[in-house]
Amino acid sequence: MNCTTIEDNFSDYLEDSLPAKLRQSVADHLRSCPNCQREFDLFQQSVSALQQLPEIEPSAFFDTDLQIQLALTEMMPPPERVPILDQVGGKFWQLIGSWRWVVSTVLAFVVIAVYLMATRIDVVLVSSSEKQSNPQVQSIEKRDLVDEDSDSFPFSSDSMFDPAVEIQQNYVFPTVTYSALSTGGRL
Amino acid sequence: MPRNSIENEFCLDDRLMLQCQKGEAEAFNQIVQRHRTALVTFIARLLGDRETAEDLAQESLLRMYRAANRYKAEGSTKFTTWMYHIASNLCKNELRNRNRRQRHFMVQTDDQLRLDQDLIATAPADPALQPDQQLVKKEQQSAVQNAISLLPETYRLPLVLRDIQGLSYNQVSATLKLPLGTVKSRINRARLMLKDLLKPVVSPTER
């Protein structure tokens, strides 16, 4: 204990709320240092003077004025009961604080992203399982791989030499067939 | 005051508030009678101005009446902390308005000092003291009141609640919604400031 740190303990020492060891240390320092003892005495006197300040009685008009104002005042209605979910939600937004707009935007994006991913996964899963289980798909895919000699080929043999038809045949037709089968006709 | 008696006092406040919620107007009148002196003293010591103190005490009581239906009786010291919390907020606003007015209009503190003297002059004299002792005591009270008015708001509030209103550290902490450690250190700091301000008035040899 020294002269600079002792002041931090004045209130606790005065109110006798210091741990025994610290209290002894403060008492020892006060005994050995007349300046600190004088400062502590001043401290004690100041607190005592403060505590002895008299109460202030309200004036004679206080009650009358208040009664007039009370007569013109209405009580607020009791608070409505908030459902438990709203309370939980309220606490959540209270925790989030001023970041609520950022958080709600991010949450919205996350929900959209999850939905999109789930949809794509669904398509891939359905398509791969259908490919394995549905021989029709396999046959169509095989047929689509430019099986030019097949009887069921939908274009005439003349159109095979037209470059535009060739592009349509290799690109557009298989895609349409694949999508319609894999999504069950939803797309 | 024994602990049981203090607890009964707090329970009485809660009971009166419950009666008030049921529409018994007399219950709130009893609350006013029980706490009006404490409220006026608290605000007057904090602001150093009796007239404003009465206005703000009335405003505190009106706010308490308006919000009576929202008060939840939880025993312990809830009512006292609720009451001082409302009054403290009004005092903070008043002190901020005063500071703003002083900054804008360069008002000197002479008015403030006059009001403080007025506050001391209206305090009842102690009949046990001789006239010259009474004069010395009033001068000392005046000096203490002026010293309180010179403290910054953050230190003044906890000090008045603790040393003039006699609240415990926990109650001060609950009233000002500050951590207990902060309250303790602010009160100690405020007392040290007060000691420095009162050095010319308070002499340790008086003991």
Image: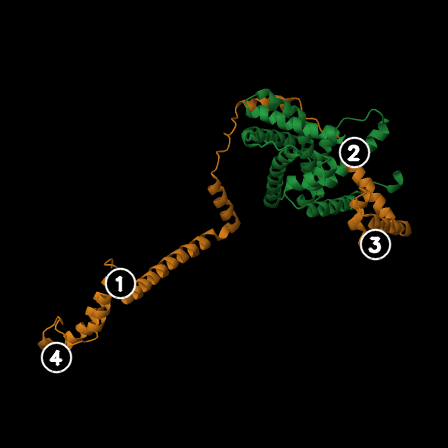
Chain colours: A orange, B green
**CB within 8 Å, label 1 to label 2:** no
Q: Which residue is mark 1?
A: A182
Left or right placement of residue A128 versus residue B100 in this view: left
Disc 1: host chain: A
Label 1 crowd bin: few (<14), some (14–19), many (20+), radius 10 Å: many
Reading the chain from its start, which is encountered first: label 4 or label 2? 2
Left or right placement of residue A166 versus residue B47 in this view: left
> What is the spatial separation of the Cα atoms under label 1 and label 3, in whole angstroms?
86 Å
Q: Which residue is mark 2?
A: A52
Whether callout 4 and callout 2 share a subunit is answered: yes
Q: Which residue is mark 3?
A: A3
Q: Position of residue B166 (x, y in %)?
A: 73, 35
Whether callout 1 and callout 2 share a subunit is answered: yes
| Residue B138 shows in this picture | yes
Which callout, 1 or 4, points to the residue nearer the camera? 1
> What is the spatial separation of the Cα atoms under label 4 and label 2, in whole angstroms?
113 Å
> Within the image, what quadrant is residue B151 found in?
top right
Reading the chain from its start, which is encountered first: label 2 or label 3? 3
Kindly state the secondary structure of the residue where label 2 is placed: loop
> What is the spatial separation of the Cα atoms under label 2 and label 3, in whole angstroms?
29 Å
Residue at 61%, 22% (x, y): give it: B27
